[in-house]
Amino acid sequence: MRDHVASFGIGVATGLRSMTACAALSWAAASGRTRARWIPAGPGARAVATAAALAEMAGDKMPFAPDRRIPPSVLARLVIGAAGGAALAGRVSPGGGAVAGMAGALAGTLLGRAARGARTRTASDWARALSEDAAAAGLAALAVRSAAPPEGRTERPAPVRP
């Protein structure tokens, strides 16, 4: 169950801010917290993913930012949620983790949009947008931290140095 919670959590973070989840997964892979060897984990990949997450947070507040519920955006969030869920599945089936990640991504997409609204014009709109940024980053970090070590690992990996 714990593994599915981490998978669902990274999915919700993906629904809120997709690139934040990607950055968290890259950092997790660098510290040995994922079961997926295909997640880029080098310093360059972590830097690019982190920069993309920050750019997404800034771009999300622009008036021309597309709605997260349009089909290409939802599809991308589902794919990233599934990949993240499978990567954090720990000792359970990657397929189950992928399903939990997709469910979380859909929930995060719809609930994030409902809680936040579509605009970023007033101070309260900005406060909701910044709160969503913080929630996405915090949830992604919590999901990665709470994920069980991959099968065969019993100890926590050493911290990653930038």
Image: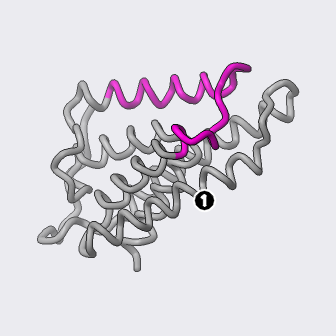
Q: Label 1: how many residues lie within 10 Å, few (<14), some (14-19) or many (20+)?
A: some
Magenta segment's dominant SS is helix
How far across and how far down the image is residue 18, in percent?
A: 49, 41
How far across and how far down the image is residue 104, in percent?
A: 52, 61
Q: Is residue 70 magenta?
A: yes
Find the magenta span and give its range: 47-74
The residue at 47%/31% (across/down) is 53
- The residue that disc 1 covers is 107
Residue 60's quadrant in the figure?
A: top right
Q: Is residue 129 above or below residue 157?
A: above
Amino acid under label 1? Ala
Q: Does the magenta stretch include residue 105?
A: no
Residue 42's quadrant in the figure?
A: top left
How far across and how far down the image is residue 78, in percent?
A: 46, 51
Near-viewer residue (63 or 9): 63
Q: Is residue 51 left or right of residue 130?
A: left
